[in-house]
Image (tube, rainbow, N blue to C red):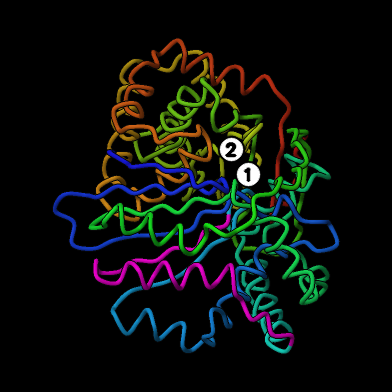
Amino acid sequence: MSAAVTRLANGLTVAVDPMAGAESAAIGLYAAVGSRSEEARLGGLAHLVEHMVFKGAGGRDARAIAEAIEDVGGSLNAWTARDQTVFHARTLPADVALALELIAGLVRAPTLDADELEREKQVILSELGETLDAPDDLIHDRLMEAAFDGQPIGRPVLGTAETIVAPTRDDCAGWLADQYTPSRLIVSAAGRVDPDAVLRQAEALFGDLADRPAPPVEAARFTGGTRRERKRAEQAHLAIAFPGLAAGSAGAPALSLFAQAVGGGMSSRLFQELREERGLAYSIYAWTQGFAETGLFAVNLAADRARAAEAFALTLDTLAAAAETLSEAELARARAQLEAGIVMALETPQGRADAMARSLEVFGRVMTTGEMLGELRAVDVAAARAAGAAMLAGPRATATIGAGMALAA
C-alpha cells in the first residue's frame, strides 16, 4: 500500500490510497467505538444508532438516501462490532464526493425521528430473533459472554430484547455526540480516488468537529466460564475459547499462524481429524480475534448430539498435540494461506480501505504489504508451537447449544 495519511487539526485521520488500474472506489468512515462502550441498560445502542442514521440524515429521508447512492450505481452500508462502527460506500470515481457527503450526513446530521426510532426497534428485535434462531450465530455471543464474564465486551452487539427497546432519542443523539470524537474517526478511501480531493472534502465535512477527549473504555480481561443453551437443535453446536493476544501484540502473527494450521482450512488438523478421519463434525474451524488490550483464540464446531462429547474431547486433544508437534510443512501451508488472503484482500478497493483503517487504529500508521507479509515470514515453527502452548495454558471458555452434556470449564 502507498497511502497518503493526514491528521486534521482536530485529530481526525484521513487515509487515501489510489490504486493503479482501479475503475471503482471505496470510501468509509471508521469509528473506533462499538458496543463495548455501552451502558448495560442500553445494550445494543451502538447498533441501534447505526440503523437510525439511515432513516434520515443530511436533509434526506431514508428513501432519498437510498436513491441518492443507487441512482449512480453505488452502494452505502454500515456495520457495528464490539470495538468499531463503520459506514462505507462503493462508487464509481465520479461519485466519491457524493458518497462521502452522504456518510458525513449520517453521523453529523441525522434526523433521529422519535416515531422512526420506535419502528426501528421492532426491526432490530426481528434481527435479534433471527440470531436466536441461528445456532451458529448465537453460539458466538454465548462464547463471548463466557470468555469475558460480566464485562461490556462480552455482551452481545445487538443487545437483548429488554435493552433494545430502552434507548430514547436523546440516548441516540448523546451516543453520537459523546462517542464520535475526532481522534476516534478515520476517513479511509482506496481505488480510483484523488487524494487531494478526498482530503479537501474531509476537511470541509469534518474539520469543524470539536476536538475533545474520548470517553474511557472499560478494560477487558479473559475470565473463562461456561454458557449452555438447552434449546432443541438437530446438531450440537460447541465453541471453545482460550486467552488470545491484543491486536497489536508482537506475538499475534504466531498465534494467527497456529490457528490457521490447526483449524483454518480443509487441510488443517481439526478438519482432517474430526471430519475426514472420524466423521464427527461437518463444520469445524479455528479463529482468533484481537482487541486493544486482549484477545481470544477459539474453535467452533457442529456435531451430532450423540457424539458431541467425543468431538469436544478430540478437539482439545488435537489442539494440545499441535502445540507440541506442529510441523514445518503445516506452518508453511498456513503461512501461504494467510499471505494469499492478505494479498487478495488488498487487490480490492474495499479491502484496502478496511486494511488502512484497521492498521491506523491498531498501530497508528498504515502497514505496508511487505511489513504484513514480513511478520508472518518471521514466525518459525518453534514460535508457532509456543504461541499455541501459551494460549492453551490459560483459562478456558466453553459455550454449547443443544449439546445435552456438561463440559467442565
Secondary structure, mark 1, is strand
Residue 86 part of the magenta-drawn span: yes
**Residue at the (34%, 55%) spot, across then down:** 350
The picture quadrant where one finds residue 133 is bottom right
The picture quadrant where one finds residue 131 is bottom right
Pointer 1 local density, CA inside 10 Å: few below 14, some 14–19, many at least 20 = many
Which marked residue is nearer to the observer: mark 2 or mark 1? Answer: 2
The answer to whether residue 194 is above or below residue 173 is: above
Q: Amino acid at mark 2?
A: Ala
**Residue at the (62%, 34%) spot, across then down:** 295
**Residue at the (51%, 44%) spot, across then down:** 280
Foreground pick, 32 / 280: 32
Left of 68 or right of it: where is 43?
Answer: right
**In the rendering, at what x and y percent does residue 126 appear?**
66, 78
Comes first in the chain, label 2 or label 1 = 1
**In the rendering, at what x and y percent does residue 142 appear?**
71, 51
Identify the magenta region: 85-114
Secondary structure, mark 2, is strand
**In the rendering, at what x and y percent does residue 309 appear?**
66, 40
Asked if one can make out residue 37 in the rendered structure from this viewpoint, the answer is yes
Q: Amino acid at mark 1?
A: Ala
Pointer 2 local density, CA inside 10 Å: few below 14, some 14–19, many at least 20 = many
Q: Which residue is mark 2?
A: 298
The answer to whether residue 357 is above or below residue 233 is: above
Asked if one can make out residue 402 in the rendered structure from this viewpoint, the answer is no
Q: Which residue is mark 1?
A: 239
